[in-house]
Image (cartoon, rainbow, N blue to C red):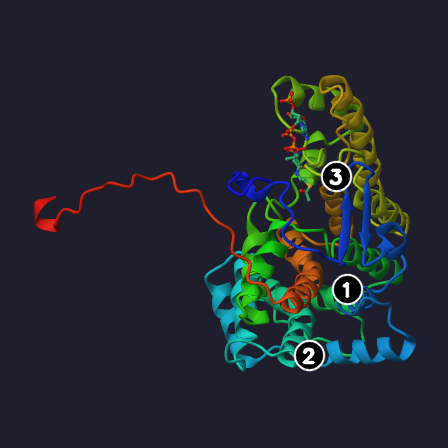
Amino acid sequence: MAENTLKPGLEGVIAAETRLSSVDGQRGELIIAGIPVEALAGNATFEETIYLLWHDALPTASQLAQFRADLARRRELPQATLDLLKEAATQKSVVMDALRMAAGTLGLSTTGSASTGEAEEEALTLVAAFPTIVAAYWRWLHGDEPIAPRSDLGQATNYLYMLSGEPPGPEQVRAMETYLNTVADHGFNASTFAARVIISTQSDMISAIAGAVGALKGPLHGGAPGPALDMVFEIKEAARAESHLRDKLERGERLMGFGHRVYKVRDPRAEVLGVAVERLYQSGGDKALYELARHVEVTAVALLAEYKPGRNLQTNVEFYTALLLHGLGLPTELFSPTFAVSRVAGWTAHCFEQQQTGRLIRPKASYIGVKDRRWVPVEER
Ligand code: ACO
């Protein structure tokens, strides 16, 4: 690349090396720390995936027990965090804003740039506390008291428990584990890059992750929850699917939950979540909705091939994420925060990786302003 070539949005620019995840959009392949997502997501607990990302190896049984315990005892929130969440709930802040603000308070004991040991401590605290923050805030927002985390439960189980107050069944836990594993890391997306930029200045882990939450909030990244599901709800019954979708395409609208900037074949995460969703809805829940969604999916893919030939527009991760989280009883407002509960694993792993390179991320901008503006004192303007 020529020294001064402009790459708007840094598209195609390789800014780092990573061993955390490999995204191949042409082959429809996602590998997480060496393991294809299809092999990892449906088998691992979320703790195993976090450990794998952080340590570049699957934990042994004793390492896993220790890691689970290390996370479990960091789930309780500091009083200052609880106070802030309670106040935010009275102002009806959106959940991602509450999460960003609360994430910042987890660093009350830190003093600025973090040593490696402190970074690990902060990373454990962040990963452990994110589900508690989201669940406590959600309950306060709806006039309920938060439910204290249970240290005898795994991350996924405890998250569902704190949201509803009911211990989830095994199929629900498996579905949540699979979701958390599937979206834990995905190359150099905007929030991951934001975290790496912040930590590259030798700032601390808490600052980096609070920044990443801010980046994830935007609608172009993780902040447009549930539009795919809304489309299924709008359609209401299978017989209406084709005409409804055709009308949208005739009007030049996009079908939500289809197409991807990177994947030009089916998104492997959609594949993995599709299997998890089928299991979840077979074990209970709104089977009619599931059947309708499958019909909408098949119809949409066929119509996209007709209206956009050669584009190969396939189902993306949003479609099955929406169905899965809905099947677990989560409202759409919790989709992005639940994404953050998972992605904090990848963000923290990227921060560790960035700290090892020690290189400040500092690109350039091409100046396009004037260079000969005359200084005029304020009284003469
Ligand atoms: N429905 C209808 N047409 C589509 C769709 C869609 N979902 N996606 C792309 N197209 C069409 C475009 O209109 C365009 O057609 P044209 O050349 O005739 O104008 C062509 O396919 C290429 O579109 P681009 O915008 O260049 O493709 P891009 O790679 O930028 O799009 C995106 C990716 C933004 C995800 C797009 O597919 C989309 O808008 N999908 C719907 C929204 C959605 O599901 N978002 C969640 C994405 S999942 C995630 O990001 C984690």
Taking 236 as reference, is 280 above or below it?
below
User: Label for residue 321?
Assistant: none
Q: Quadrant of ligand 1?
A: top right
- Mark 2 closeness class: few <14, some 14–19, many ≥20 residues within 10 Å: some
Which x, y percent locates residue 232?
Answer: 72, 35
User: Label for residue 316?
Assistant: 3
Q: Quadrant of residue 191?
A: bottom right
Relative depth, front residue between 315 and 172: 315
Residue at 57% of width from left, 68% of height from top?
103
Residue at 57% of width from left, 64% of height from top?
200
The residue tagged 2 is 74
Q: Quadrant of residue 353?
A: bottom right
SS at badge 1 = helix
Q: Earlier in the sequence, mark 2 or mark 1?
A: 1
SS at badge 2 = loop
- Residue type at numbered disc 1: Leu
Kindly report the distance in space between the C-alpha atoms of the residues bearing marks 2 and 1.
Answer: 19 Å
Kindly report the distance in space between the C-alpha atoms of the residues bearing marks 2 and 3.
Answer: 34 Å
SS at badge 3 = loop
Ligand 1 contact, mark 3 (Cβ < 8 Å): yes
Q: Is there a contact, CB below 8 Å, between mark 3 and mark 1?
A: no
Which numbered mark, 3 or 1, is in the foreground of this view? 1
Which x, y percent locates residue 250?
Answer: 64, 17
The residue tagged 1 is 53
Relative depth, front residue between 261 and 197: 197
Viewed as shown, does residue 196 lie left or right of 92?
right
Residue at 80% of width from left, 34% of height from top?
265
Which x, y percent locates residue 27?
Answer: 83, 38
Ligand 1 contact, mark 1 (Cβ < 8 Å): no
- Mark 1 closeness class: few <14, some 14–19, many ≥20 residues within 10 Å: many
